[in-house]
Image: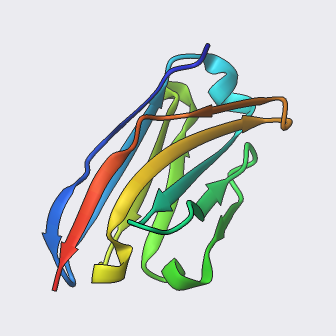
């Protein structure tokens, strides 16, 4: 069982920034696709950003240019730098590890609240 622990959530005003971290308990992190998802109240969980084991990245259209996903394999850690935050970015953010579709793990989630 791989443990994923997120940190860095909180309350921020619109236009502000936050940085999320996700630490994995197993070195499978280094060969897995990592991603951040979020879930707003009353809505389905959605993919925010992904980073593959070759460090290529992909973003949802509504965060492009504002969010940056990164990873440090030596520390089994993934980050999400969030700038120019908007109230619609509010939600619970989840760290996700996916190795070949066969091993999928989730963090416990961290709350982000952006006030207008």
Between residues 6 and 73, which one lies in front from this camera angle?
A: 6
Q: As displayed, is residue 51 above or below residue 76?
A: below
6, above or below 67, in the image = above
Q: Is residue 84 visible?
A: no
Instruction: Tell me: 92 left or right of 43.
Output: left
Of 8 and 52, nearer the camera is 8
Q: Residue at x 25, y 51 (%)?
A: 9
Q: Is residue 98 above or below residue 39?
A: above
Q: Estimate the x, y position of residue 4 in percent, counting from the top left.
A: 48, 28
Give residue 98's quadrant in the image: top right
Q: Residue at x 36, y 68 (%)?
A: 82
Q: Position of residue 18 (x, y in %)?
A: 26, 62
The residue positioned farthest toward the top in the image shown: 1
Residue at image point 56% right, 64% down? 44
- Report the number of numbered marks: 0
Which quarter shows the C terminus?
bottom left
Question: Looking at the image, what colour scheme do you see?
Answer: rainbow
In the displayed structure image, the side of residue 76 where residue 104 appears, left or right: right
Q: Residue 48 in the image: state x and y as whole percent.
A: 55, 65
Above or below for 40 versus 107: below
Residue 103 coordinates in the image, percent (x, y): 76, 27
Residue 7 appears in view: yes
Q: If the image is split into quadrants, where does the N terminus sit?
A: top right
Residue farthest along the front direction in this orientation: 42
Q: Residue visible at 59% across and 42% down?
A: 96
């Amino acid at each position: 069982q791989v443990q994923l622990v997120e940190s860095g959530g909180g309350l921020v005003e619109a236009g502000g920034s936050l940085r999320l971290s996700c630490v994995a308990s197993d070195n499978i992190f280094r060969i897995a696709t990592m991603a951040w998802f979020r879930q707003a109240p009353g809505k389905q969980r959605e993919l925010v950003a992904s980073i593959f084991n070759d460090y290529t990245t992909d973003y949802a259209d509504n965060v492009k240019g504002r969010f940056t996903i990164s990873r440090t394999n030596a520390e089994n850690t993934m980050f999400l730098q969030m700038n120019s935050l908007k109230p619609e970015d509010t939600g619970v953010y989840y760290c996700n590890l996916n190795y070949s579709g066969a091993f999928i793990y989730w963090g416990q989630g961290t709350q982000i609240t952006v006030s207008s």
